[in-house]
Amino acid sequence: MRAADGHHDTAIEVVVEPSVYDAAVDLLWQHGAAAVAEVEGADGSTTLLAGFEPARIGNEAPDMAPVIGALRLLGARPRTITIDADAGWLTTWRAGEPSHSVGPFHLRLPEHQAVATAVVTPIDLVIEPSTTFGFSHASTRLALALLGGLDLTQARVADIGCGSGVLAIAAAKLGAASVHAVDIDDHAVATTIENAHRNEIELTAIIGSVGALPSGAYDLVLANLTAGTSTALAPNLVPKMARNARLLVSGLLASQAEAVRRAFSGLTVEAELGEGQWHALLLHRPE
């Protein structure tokens, strides 16, 4: 999800269930949101906070009625709020964004401190989400948990829909020989490259989808997408997998897992994890 820094007076706070999450986010962008942040609830719901710039003429507050109405038709629960315009959108969001320990990883913003214990020092993932929000979403945590259990020494990895680059960077830090990341959003690709430099690792990030990947087979394909996108891309993803390769699919609801399994029926389920209503699968292509 893209975001732009700046000062915002008007915002929409909307509680959405996982089943309408993607539609709600799309509506907010379509209606001119300048930034979208999210906070997960203990019940599996997500609260989206979308900031809107003042109207270009007269600096008037934007009309929120159309987007409020569209969100209600989805079954979401929106309300208009105001934010301290002097605080800065990203400053407000970052103040409440925690660091996360997932498997062998510690995921944090650049201003947060690295952690270490007497027993183990986690793999540090320093991610700047200034142009891609959602880097700490449940779908990302599930993907990191599955990824952390893999031996990627000398592996060739592809990341489809790389976003902030967190999964691609994690794969590189696990010893992958090469990592190729793609995203149809040029802002996401730029952020992935910046975060790779921030983490002092090398990878290739390209604007595009599966077809933009360099030729050849991959030992691991990462797809933290929506269930619909993953199933639609299935005919293109599987041919990119080497024999004995794995496909990590995240970003789906538990209720959608069976449909995703069917879309990749030639692969076997090696592992799966859930958090609330979110689900992730690790699939294996036989030799």
Image (cartoon, rainbow, N blue to C red):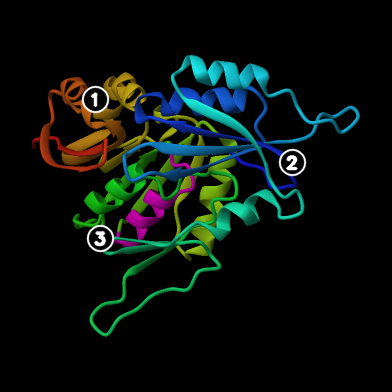
Query: In terms of secondary structure, where does tag 3 sit?
Result: loop
Residue name at image x 33 percent, y 54 percent: 171
Q: Position of residue 73 (x, y in %)?
A: 49, 14
Residue 270, position as x, y percentages in the image: 11, 41
Label 2 is placed on what type of residue? Asp
* Label located before the other in sequence (1 or 3): 3
Q: Residues within 10 Å of mark 1 (few under 14, many from 20)?
A: some
Q: Quadrant of the C terminus?
A: top left
Q: Judge from the rendering whether residue 4 lies leftward or rightward of residue 215; answer left or right.
A: right
Mark positioned earlier in the residue sequence (2 or 3): 2
> Which labelled disc corresponds to residue 256?
1
**Where does label 2 land, which residue?**
9
Residue at the spot 44% in from the left edge and 41% down from the top edge: 162
* Span highlighted in magenta in the image: 162-175
The residue carrying mark 3 is 103
Residue drawn at x 54%, y 56% is 128
